[in-house]
Amino acid sequence: MTASFFRLALAQANATLGDVARNADLVRAARREAARAGADLVLFPELMLAGGQPAGLTLVPAFQDACRRTCEALARETADGGPAVLLGLPWVEGGRIYNALALLDGGVIQAVRFKHRLGAYGGVDEARVFSTGPMPGPVPFRGQVRLGLAIGTDIADEEVAECLAETGAEMLLVADASAYRRGIGDVRMNAAVARVVETGLPLVWLNAVGGQDEQVLDGASFALGHERNLTLQLPAFAEALAVMPWSRERGAWRCETGEIAPVPTADAADYAACVLGLRDHVRRTGTAGILLALGGLAPALAAMMAVDAVGPERVCAVVLDMAGDEEREQAESQAFAQSLGIPCRVVPIAPLGALLAETLGEGIDATGAALTAARGALLTALAAQESRTLLSEATAAPLVDVFDPVRPFSETEIARLCELRQGWKPAGALGRDGAIVPAAWLAQRPDPQRDEILSALGLGRRVAEIVADGHARQTVMVLQEEFRRRRRAVLGPAGVRLTDEGPRQPPRHGFVDGGEPVHEPDAALVRGVGRNGGESIDF
């Protein structure tokens, strides 16, 4: 390889799970933007065309056909002389399905690499869906550079990176679709630094971004020079496209230091993740907006997240006038809604609870379970009538979409996030600046022992151990029942499984089988597929 310069574009994209056509349009748009910036090659995240980890959807033949057909169409489009594309997708070869990265250039599929080290994402075991690819060798690109291509967990240990380096790779490009979790930034950076140290090669790590039900892909892509220096840091929780100019100096590829975006951590990262997850959930379900009931810190936090996610014009609130509620509490909720810029109405609920109790007969307490049931029924009816996503911890009803943005947080964390939002908001948030939550609500401090006990139960600790830590046994037993109730709500309705279903399809995805005939892959379009580490040249 004799070239001394090339430009690499990173497309930190927000793809939609299963919506192959929309994802292909994102690829085209990013490629056009990269072309205007003079890029030679555009790297996209892992499984970009599928929109992320599609689990059981990968096994659907029509979905496999859609991905391959679209990949071939995108490959033909590269005959225009513009940038090449490194595209992630499920790839069927020899009756097996692989997690693949395809190089599209010059009107053909120049090379395909398969993921070797399969991982687990959000409870999805890749090994139940994908086959293990061979150890990869480098891919030559336009006579300029030998690319070491890795996918996701391929760089979790040294095996794949060292194989690429030993067979002639000059830089490591990693396409990932990794979900946010607390502390994940350090885990990623430590793995990347270790691979740079072991191979002596620069490394580019590109992550997807976007909410996918319980998971949020956080982006925060970065690049390291061969001396482990940070040369690029893209923002977290936002789409981005960056073009990196690379030059060969004294036999090594170097990149000028580009954007170093600040990346939120701790509570700020948690808040930003929930906002992005909620925003994408509403966009992908197609509801008209968000409905929630106010009253207390947890609904206040959910309301702020909702406004930051979709804007005040798409959020509406209700105050449910329960039996015995004080006018002061209602007034505080209405003032809070006004400060957010969202409409709020008071809905009396006691008469509905009494009617339900009367219908069910003697022994029903109109202020207890019947009132709770009436509350859920009323919120569901309002959300269904207005085609809105209901922010609630209730289990999903058939008529309405339900999302609980504050489910991951303890009461202590909810209070802390409310205080954080008083003086900060994430980039791209659509809500107002400044103090919003009433001081009286913030003054109601949660019980830290309650959170400690619930956290211990979530970790599977014995009741005896928790009691030995100094907690009252009766309190622990009561909270254990609350924990079990919450867990049942998260799992949803129970039912009997009578068959071995295999990997399940995601509960929400954008794939629709349009009835197209079986696709016969164009073998003439593909130059090299899945070569192992002993073969450093594809074509």
Image (cartoon, grey):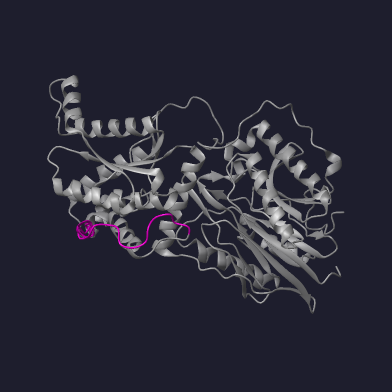
Compared to residue 193, the image places residue 502 above or below, namely: above
- Is 14 included in the stretch rendered in magenta? no
- Is 441 included in the stretch rendered in magenta? yes
Specify the segment rendered in magenta: 428-447
Q: Main secondary structure of the magenta part?
A: loop
Residues 412 and 472: in front is 412
Compared to residue 519, the image places residue 225 above or below, namely: below
Compared to residue 85, the image places residue 255 above or below, namely: below
Asked which quadrant contains residue 155, the reply is bottom right
10 horizontally vs 395: left or right? right
Q: Residue furthest bottom?
A: 250
Asked which quadrant contains residue 271, the reply is bottom left
Asked which quadrant contains residue 455, the reply is bottom left
Please say whether residue 270 is visible from this viewpoint. Answer: yes
Please say whether residue 462 is visible from this viewpoint. Answer: no
**Residue 497: where, in percent of width, then height?**
47, 27
**Residue 440: where, in percent of width, then height?**
19, 58
